[in-house]
Amino acid sequence: MLLAPFSAPGRFWRGNLHTHSNLSDGALEPKAVVDAYKNAGYDFMQLSEHFIGNFDFPIADTRAFRSNSFTTLIGAELHAPETAVGELWHIVAAGLPLDFPRNLDGENGAQVSARAAEAGAFIGIAHPAWSHLTIEDGRAITSAHAVEIYNHGCAIENDRGDGWYLLDQMLTEGKRLTAFATDDAHFKTPDHFGGWVHVKAESLDPEALLASLKKGLHYSSMGPQIHGIEMNGKEISISCSPVDTITVLCGTSRTAVRNGRAITDASFDLAKLEKGWLLKKQSGWFRVVVIDNAGKRAWSNPIWWDELR
């Protein structure tokens, strides 16, 4: 059985959900940012301007930059008080209406994200490590679809690009969330083209992409590609572009791994994994990571045992 998103109809579209122009604190005009992603081989992107009074609550209208071979999502990076360390929330919202209302008086992060979700947006908790988010912070955003597990700008500027520490804890608590990688590019440093999502959909229509994001039909990457994750009742099999590590992780310290040079597949015996407590007995979920010889990674979304049929 080929698992989702690899079993879903359509093809993978490469996109970035988190980046900025000079409508907020980015260096470039909106068209220049969109053109940069188009010329870099992306299929879609989103300008996620800082939705805050400092910039007059911008939502970038990028519809004029769409074509048959490239599209844009409409969204923003939402802000409201306040995280456990007393800072503003940063919440990526993809698929907002252009007339999404400004923050309401006294609105907190959980409330503004819930309002965005009700308006049809895909909600992602942004750069947990950079924001010093706690597990209590993660629990607060009950409308979230996903956690930003890699933020390239945060990674290269201050080594705080990780989000898996938060997502893994939330998964172990039973939260059904997915993962997404981004740039958070401002084009003031080499903060672009370092992390993205591959979204499986039957067309490049923005609504189709948003529907797939909400369903978890995507995986994240810094470069490597995951071609498939398959289960046949006895084994988990993974295929990918050439990498040096293929590993399966879960909600305990147990892992399964195959190492080599430019390997493109790995299979793991389910009986041995379960005996070693990697899978169902101790953890309701698992995920796959592949790592190439430059240290670049691709990450599957979490896979839940009780959802496998």
Image (cartoon, rainbow, N blue to C red):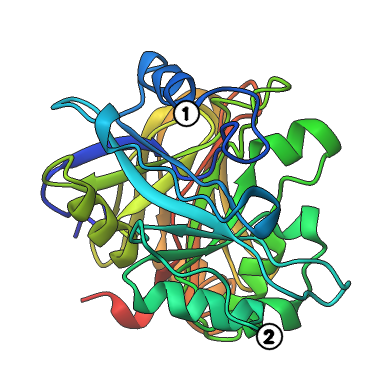
> Residue at position x 64%, y 83% from top?
105
Residue 273 place in picture, x, y as percent: 50, 66
Label 2 environment density (alpha carbons within 10 Å; few <14, some 14–19, many ≥20): few
In the image, 33 versus 265, the foreground residue is 33
Q: Quadrant of residue 307?
A: bottom left
The residue at the point 18 percent across, 53 percent down is: 208
Q: Type of residue at label 2?
A: Gly
2 vs 216, left or right, is left
Category of crowding for the residue at label 1, using alpha-carbon neighbours closer than 10 angstroms: few (below 14), some (14–19), many (at least 20): some
In the image, residue 173 sits, relative to residue 89, either above or below, namely below
- Give the amino acid at mark 1: Pro
Which sits in the foreground, 239 or 121? 121
Q: Is residue 110 above or below residue 235?
A: below
Image mark for residue 129: none
Q: Which quarter shows the N terminus? A: bottom left
Q: Is residue 68 visible?
A: yes
Q: Measured from the top left, where is residue 13 in percent x and y? A: 27, 36
Of 175 and 294, nearer the camera is 175
Q: Disc 1 designates what residue?
A: 30
Q: 29 left or right of 117?
A: right
| Residue 88 found in image quarter | bottom right
Q: Residue at x 74, y 41 (%)?
A: 154
| Residue 32, horizontal then vertical, whole percent | 47, 19
Q: Secondary structure at mark 1?
A: helix
Q: Are marks 2 and 1 in contact (CB under 8 Å)?
A: no
Mark 2 or mark 1: name the one nearer the start of the chain. 1
Q: Which residue is mark 2?
A: 106
* Dot 2: element: loop
Residue 309 picture location, percent across and down: 20, 76
Q: Residue drawn 69% across and 68% down?
A: 166
